[in-house]
Image: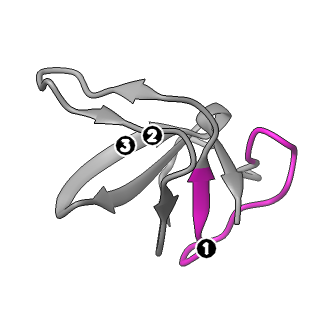
Amino acid sequence: MDTKDSNGNLLQNGDSVHLVKDLKVKGSSTVLKRGVKIKNIKLTDDPAEIDCKIEGTAIVLKTEFVKKA
């Protein structure tokens, strides 16, 4: 299974990515702003999702909302 970002680039464990869109976090009033750099991502069993930490909070993001840094 290949995990690809919104531009079709292959993602690997430990890569850094940028958000391409403002995202509201479910269950919180937090909004992740476009352009935020996320370091050290982890791939999941689902090729459409990645695990990451943003501001100390573990979050699962859809790969359609990120691009490789």
Q: Magenta includes 17?
A: yes
Q: Alpha carbon of mark 3 to alpha carbon of mark 2: how far? A: 4 Å
- Which residue in the structure is indicated by mark 3? 60
Q: Residue flagged by tag 3: what amino acid is it?
A: Val
Q: What residue sits 37% from the left and 59% below the top?
A: 52
Q: What residue sits 48% from the left and 29% below the top?
A: 22
Give the magenta range.
5-18
| Residue 61, label in figure | 2
Q: What residue sits 12% from the left and 21% below the top?
A: 27
Of marks 1 and 2, which one's residue comes earlier in the chain?
1
> What is the secondary structure assignment of the residue under circle 2?
strand
In depth, the one of 39 and 47 nearer the eye is: 39
Label 1: how many Cα within 10 Å (few below 14, some 14–19, many 20+): some
| Marker count (numbered) | 3
User: Do the residues bearing badges 3 and 2 touch, measured as CB atoms within 8 Å?
Assistant: yes
The percent coordinates of residue 9 (x first, y second) are 85, 55
The percent coordinates of residue 6 (x first, y second) are 76, 38
> What is the secondary structure assignment of the residue under circle 1?
loop
Main SS category, magenta section: loop
Q: Alpha carbon of mark 1 to alpha carbon of mark 2: how far? A: 14 Å
In depth, the one of 63 and 48 nearer the eye is: 63
The percent coordinates of residue 34 (x first, y second) are 53, 39
Q: Is residue 39 left or right of residue 10?
A: left
Q: Is residue 58 left or right of residue 37?
A: left
Q: What residue sits 43% from the left and 39% below the top?
A: 33
Q: Quadrant of the C terminus?
A: bottom right
| Residue 15, label in figure | 1
